[in-house]
Amino acid sequence: MKVLNLYACLGGNRLLWENCEVTAVEIDPGLAQMYKDKFTNDTVIVADAHQYLLDHYKEFDFIWSSPPCPTHSVTNHFLNAQGIIRYPDMGLWQEIIFLKHFFKGKYCVENVTSYYEPMFNPKKIGRHYLWSNFLIPTIPQPKKDIGRMNGKRQSAGKKTKEERNAVNSELGLHILNTARGIIIDNNIEQGKLF
């Protein structure tokens, strides 16, 4: 299974993925190197993930995208009150629309719970909004697991922004396994036709 992991950052969502060929795209060279050090078998591309998706989407069976969340986050209410005013980054919606209409494989686009009503209804699990072309069963996200990465608990004060924003690795595995099961079932069904 060929997987594209966009906006890979530290790879929190990818931590438990096995038996797949992962291409990770991260624009920050330092974060890309940290990712590569952790996931030595993955192909790591330092590039604009938004453009990479457009240029390479046909090469993959499953696409995970976690576009930057700061302009969608509820913290925008606080920032706006402090005079920091910005539009939501529409790249999130561009990717959802593009994948929905043109990608033949399975995809999941993840982002934080937003301060506004989403343009398209998401699946909500924990603090995450998820848009996909397959049904993602809900799994519990116990509060004790929020803030865990690499099996370690860290206080929010000790975590980097990237660690705080990382998707829980069990949730990442749950979503990949759900997509993988659908892809395998579809391949079996197609094989029965001939």
Image: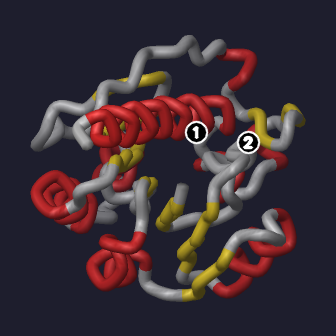
| Mark 2, secondary structure of its residue | loop
In three-dimensional space, the C-alpha distance between marks 1 and 2, rounded to whole angstroms, equals: 8 Å
In this rendering, would 61 be left or right of 167? left
* Image quadrant occupied by the N terminus: bottom right
Q: Quadrant of residue 185?
A: top left
Res 154 seen here: yes
Q: How far across and down, in percent of the image, does residue 108 sit?
A: 37, 46
Amino acid type of the residue that numbered disc 2 sits on in the rendered structure: Leu
Residue at image point 53% right, 40% down = 176
Q: Residues within 10 Å of mark 1 (few under 14, many from 20)?
A: many
Q: How far across and down, in percent of the image, does residue 16 sit?
A: 73, 42
Q: Disc 1 marks which residue?
A: 172
Whether label 1 touches label 2, CB < 8 Å:
yes
Q: How far across and down, in percent of the image, does residue 70 sit?
A: 41, 57
Q: Quadrant of residue 152?
A: top right
Q: Disc 2 marks which residue?
A: 16
Observer-nearest residue: 141 or 75? Answer: 141
- Position of residue 66 relative to residue 120, above or below, is below
In this rendering, would 185 be left or right of 26? left
Residue at image point 84% right, 64% down = 38
Residue at image point 44% right, 15% down = 138
Amino acid type of the residue that numbered disc 1 sits on in the rendered structure: Gly
Q: Quadrant of residue 8?
A: bottom right
In this rendering, would 81 be left or right of 164? left
